[in-house]
Image (tube, helix red, strand yellow):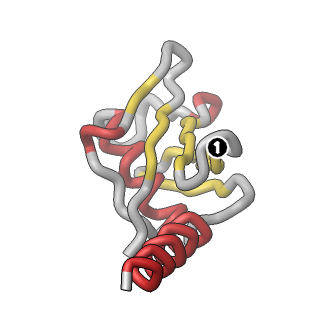
Amino acid sequence: MRVTILACVMMAASAAQAAGPTEPVQVTLWERVWTVAPIKERPGSYSAIRDAGDNNPFGRPAIRKSVQAKRAFETATGCKVTWSTMTKDIRDTFYAPVTCP
């Protein structure tokens, strides 16, 4: 019985990790371009960085970067991100593990 449960858990974990993209994906949100890429060292985790070259000062109203990053992760991977697991470094790159259904 324990072997069956362990096998099911391992299959679910590998399916969750394989659900997201394996190559970098560009996503456009609120007229901003985000690049979401998997982190090879941490399966199931992704990084997102916003392209600063297309900032239009006369564009749509500002939206917090963390909100945009969360939406970019979810749009690119089709999986959910928990706020408490998302981090940001000094270069404004966001990192987060994703949970796929």
What residue is pinned by disc 1?
39
- Which quadrant would the N terminus be assigned to in this image? bottom left
Residue 49: where, in percent of width, then height?
A: 56, 36
Residue at horizontal 71 percent and vertical 61 percent from the top: 22
Between 14 and 31, the one lying in front of the other is: 14
Dot 1 amino acid type? Ile
Residue 95: where, in percent of width, then height?
A: 48, 37
Residue at horizontal 74 percent and vertical 58 percent from the top: 23
Check disc 1 and report its element: helix, strand or loop. loop
Q: 28 left or right of 61?
A: right
Q: 37 left or right of 10?
A: right
Residue at horizontal 61 percent and vertical 69 percent from the top: 18
Residue 42: where, in percent of width, then height?
A: 60, 43
Between 16 and 5, the one lying in front of the other is: 5
Q: 76 left or right of 2?
A: right
In the picture as drawn, the residue positioned furthest to the right comes out as 23
Residue 63: where, in percent of width, then height?
A: 29, 38
Residue at horizontal 55 percent and vertical 17 percent from the top: 91
